[in-house]
Amino acid sequence: MSKKEKIRKFLYIIGIVSGGGLLIYQLISAIKAIPQTDFSQNAHYLIISSIFLSTFAIGMQIAGWYVIINSGVFTINFSSVVKGYSISFLPRYLPGTIFGYISRGEWLFQKYSIPFSMSNSISIWEIIATLTANVLIIFVYLINNFIPTYWITIIVLPLIPLLIHKLLVLLFSLLNRMEINIFGKLLRINSVPQKQWILCVLFFIFHWVFLGFALFQILASLGVDKISFLNVLFSGNLSWLSGFFVFFAPAGLGYREATLSYLLNDTFGVSAGIASIASSFFRLSTITAELLWILFGLLLERSLKGRLS
């Protein structure tokens, strides 16, 4: 085993142990709190609606990636994207987030002969689009709470994605000219047209909003009715960021749940037990939504094979 592989395995073990420990703690807290929780009378409908909203959110994520992948010289139809997107990205759970992007690059190369340099470029643009949409929503929350002037939100925030695109094009052009080698391979990041970039960011904004509504429904099922949607949306987005930057934890395992539980409890006054239940249910809701997209992709592939035979 090479030194690089040993480091990767060590980080993976740290991610599993630390993230898994946090997740188990959240689950235990949630289980303990369930007997003392007064669920809403229509809790089961609200939980089901949260799963549907999470499913729509994943659909927006897929649509955003579809726009990016078709912004260059290669073209993949939407049904093919649906079939391969979720399945190829499963390795982000095991062994970790970065491996989801590697797996997807392998799928694009094997299935559509898209070179790794191109798929890596797409992944970089997708990650930045996700972060941009996420942070824009956090900015809306901060402006709403600390600078309650709506013209700033309406005028300034839409300009941020445009500015980011301009800066990225310049940065990536500079990096390409520098001919940087990483692990013996020349770094080259292709540009994405501004129109596709803006559309991708917009799809990811809808992605986060749908996830916010899903979490809002979960809290409503637990009898929480004194928290605004914007507060819920902010909590969900910030918790996702906490897990994203812990790159060695599979899909932010444990860290997102712990952050979400903390924000709901400490910042917005939701009881600790209900916050733990909500964060655990939210993870289950998003995982269920991804499984539904995987199932849909498999059924779609089977249907297309049946038509061709």
Image (tube, helix red, strand yellow):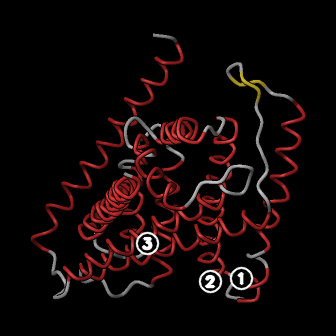
What residue type is disc 3 on? Phe
144 and 245: which one is in front? 245
- Report helix, strand or loop for mark 2: helix
Q: Position of residue 112 (x, y in %)?
A: 58, 42
Q: Residue at x 29, y 49 (%)?
A: 23
10 and 169: which one is in front? 169
* Foreground tag (1 vs 3): 3
Q: CA distance from mark 1 to mark 3?
A: 26 Å
What residue type is disc 2 on? Asn
Check the image and report above or below for 41 versus 296: below
Q: CA distance from mark 3 to mark 2?
A: 26 Å
257 and 118: which one is in front? 118
- Report helix, strand or loop for mark 1: helix
Q: Cβ–Cβ below 8 Å for labels 1 and 2?
A: yes
Q: Residue at x 42, y 24 (%)?
A: 10
Q: Residues within 10 Å of mark 3 (few under 14, many from 20)?
A: some
The mark nearer the N terminus, 3 or 2, is 3
Pointer 3 residue: 56
Q: Residues within 10 Å of mark 1 (few under 14, many from 20)?
A: some
Instruction: Look at the image and tell me whether residue 179 can be seen.
Output: yes
269 and 178: which one is in front? 178
Residue 153: image tag: 1
Q: Is residue 243 left or right of residue 273?
A: right
Q: Position of residue 276 (x, y in %)?
A: 28, 63
Residue 144: image tag: 2
The mark nearer the N terminus, 1 or 3, is 3
* Quadrant position of the N terminus in the picture: top left
